[in-house]
Image (cartoon, helix red, strand yellow):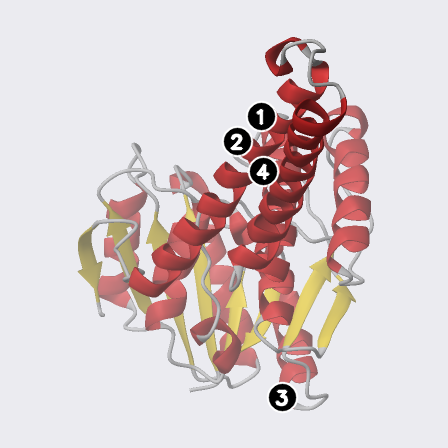
């Protein structure tokens, strides 16, 4: 199979038929073998009924319905898990991503050897203040922190080798950082393609300003995980040991001073060095224990289902 198209969605009933027809037209005109995997992330409208109707008339259409809204990352994880084609394309269901981009994205993976190609919505039709400016700041911070030189990390339109989606763990809100996850997993050939951004035709966006705040918090998380996720003791243990040594040195100084130098001076508990020593040693111990517990959690980690599937169709 040439292409698996993975489409997470939430309350996009109005756009699904039009999106399906558009994708089918592009796939057939290019003679691709393909599957379209819709992941209904707990929609409260009739999105799932529309997916069922499409699946009845076309076996290329497959679907997964979550019991409730678990988030885009979980939806992508479920789609990646069942995708079978050599190239996996992700796109949003709101018609802002154009299926006409798919053939070139496919060629970039199969003919130019990229592991991942991310779309870049260079010209956007969103609000400048509410979305464009925060998006530019967010992407600049992501580039600086991760070292992945992309202009648009959050573009839903991306193409992947199948090996990539099978070897990355998309969880929480990490869908924004899939290129970074891919790089951390060892897939270094990451490219970018300017894609057409279309104005939203139906409904309204599901994301507000909070996604940028969450995005920056997730960026800190992924920076930490990429460097110390496999060895938390290297981070917490170093800080803890350093603080403990500082506290111990102050304690040693106070002890020597009290026993041999100023034996009749102030009580140790009345001196500021005592509280510096006590605080440093307590914090050092806590940091060291945090690193130790992190190592234990890694050793005992087991895969857990992060979402619950209510129904599947053609899967």
Task: Give the mark toward the camera: 1 or 4.
Answer: 1
| Few, some or many residues within 10 Å of mark 2 (<14, 14–19, 20+) | some
Rounded to the nearest whole Å, what is the CA distance between mark 2 and mark 1?
Answer: 6 Å
Query: Residue at point 64% right, 46% down?
Result: 239
Query: Residue at point 64% right, 66% down?
Result: 100
- Tell me which label, 3 or 1, sits earlier in the chain: 3
Which residue is denoted by mark 1 in the rendering?
278
* Residue 91 occupies quadrant: bottom right
Q: Position of residue 73 (x, y in %)?
A: 45, 51
Per the image, label 2 sits on a secondary structure element best described as helix
* Residue 10 occupies quadrant: top left
- Tell me which label, 4 or 2, sits earlier in the chain: 4
Which residue is denoted by mark 4 in the rendering?
201
Position above or below: 297 against 9: below
- Image mark for residue 110: 3
Task: Give the mark toward the camera: 4 or 2.
Answer: 2
Query: Residue at point 69% right, 9% down?
Result: 266
Which residue is denoted by mark 2 in the rendering?
282
Whether residue 19 sits left or right of residue 105 in the image: it is left
Task: Give the mark toward the camera: 3 or 4.
Answer: 3
């Amino acid at each position: 199979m040439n292409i698996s198209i993975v489409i997470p969605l939430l309350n996009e009933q109005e756009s699904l038929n039009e999106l399906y027809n558009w994708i089918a037209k592009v796939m057939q005109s290019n003679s691709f073998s393909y599957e379209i995997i819709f992941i209904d992330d707990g929609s409260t409208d009739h999105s799932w009924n529309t997916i069922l109707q499409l699946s009845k008339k076309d076996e290329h259409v497959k679907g997964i319905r979550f019991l409730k809204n678990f988030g885009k990352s979980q939806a992508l994880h479920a789609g990646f898990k069942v995708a079978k084609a050599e190239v996996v394309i992700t796109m949003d269901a709101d018609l802002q991503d154009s299926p006409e981009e798919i053939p070139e994205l496919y060629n970039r993976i199969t003919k130019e050897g990229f592991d991942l190609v991310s779309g870049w919505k260079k010209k956007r039709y969103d609000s400048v203040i509410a979305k464009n400016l925060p998006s530019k700041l967010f992407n600049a911070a992501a580039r600086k922190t991760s070292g992945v030189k992309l202009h648009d990390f959050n573009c839903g339109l991306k193409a992947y080798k199948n090996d990539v989606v099978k070897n990355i763990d998309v969880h929480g809100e990490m869908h924004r950082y899939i290129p970074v996850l891919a790089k951390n997993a060892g897939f270094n050939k990451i490219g970018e393609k300017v894609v057409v951004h279309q104005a939203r035709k139906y409904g309204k966006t599901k994301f507000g300003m909070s996604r940028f705040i969450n995005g920056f918090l997730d960026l800190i998380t992924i920076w930490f995980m990429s460097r110390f996720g496999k060895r938390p003791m290297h981070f917490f243990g170093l800080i803890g040991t350093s603080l403990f040594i500082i506290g111990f040195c102050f304690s040693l100084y106070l002890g020597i001073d009290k026993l041999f130098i100023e034996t009749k001076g102030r009580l140790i508990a009345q001196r500021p060095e005592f509280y510096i020593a006590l605080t440093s040693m307590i914090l050092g111990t806590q940091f060291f224990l945090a690193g130790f517990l992190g190592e234990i959690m890694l050793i005992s980690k087991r895969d857990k289902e992060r979402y619950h599937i209510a129904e599947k169709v053609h899967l």
